[in-house]
Amino acid sequence: MVDFDRVATFYDRYRPSFNALRTEALSQHSLDNGGGRTAVDLGTGTGAMAFVLAEHGYRVTGLDHSPQMLEQARKAARRQRADIDFRLGSAANTGLARASADVVTASQSWHLFDGRRAFIECRRILEPGGALLVTTYDWLPLPGSAAHITEGLIREMNPRWRDHGGTGCHDRLAPVAAGFGFTLIRTRERRFEQRYTLDNWIGRIRTSSSGGAGLSTAERSALEGRMRHELAPRFPDDHVVVTHVAWSLSARKTNASRPAPDYSMSGTAG
């Protein structure tokens, strides 16, 4: 079972913020001018996307099912003097009023949701014409790369993990969104490189649903030991360069409502 409470205190230390890429996504999808409108960030974690939305003028509510992640988000909000409402809630059951949001975002979190229920809830809480924005920042397990080696080690330790070998492209979500009555659907993607020290790459995996939040403390410790043993000789300069894909989808709520088939969003590096 994935439990982000166990890794909440490591999250902001080891996770790249990708704030510039989150801002880029808002701009690409014409959502960078909040103007006091209401935004809801699903699976907000420690609030990375929520803070970016607030910086762009939105009144933000950040929802997550992890109390410890929310506590980290609230501490950051106090430090930054940001007026963001962080509260318990899930993508399938936000507890928010119908048609109460102008924008709903899910940044690096959609793969953790029950997608069908999340689409239904997003339609329910969005105003007519409101926008859904989904963003991901997945590593690519290119042959011989640190990500490729790491995925092999995770699969040995966590055979339940199915989201390996991803391409970073989730365009298959577009027809699913259309099936739920969303229109004006657009996707964007581009590759980029992220540089880590070996310690920070191991820490990055510690905060993932596959290699940290999805393992017991003993399993996580064993995985990190294996990673250090396998990666240190291959990256002696202590610099691990990992290719990622920044991907985003935006869609608008319409009055139409059609059921969509079940689906899964696999191949994500969360």
Image: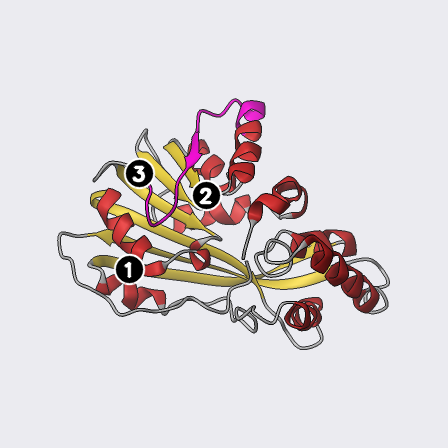
Spatial CA distance of label 2 from label 3 is 12 Å
Name above or below for residue 209 compared with residue 70.
Answer: below
Query: Is 160 displayed left or right of 248 in the figure?
Result: right
Q: Specify the label residue 95 is tagged with.
A: 3
| Rendered location of residue 98, percent (x, y) | 21, 39
Residue to which mark 2 is pinned: 65
Residue at the location (15% across, 58% down)?
A: 257
Residue at the location (77% across, 56% down)?
A: 198
Say which amino acid is labelled 3. Gly
Q: Nearer the viewer, residue 94 or 48?
A: 94
Residue to which mark 1 is pinned: 185
Q: Mark 1 or mark 3, which is nearer to you?
A: 3
Q: Residues within 10 Å of mark 2 (few under 14, many from 20)?
A: many
| Rendered location of residue 151, percent (x, y) | 65, 69
Q: What element carries label 3?
A: loop
Query: Is 75 displayed left or right of 183 in the figure?
Result: right
Name above or below for residue 201 compared with residue 235.
Answer: above
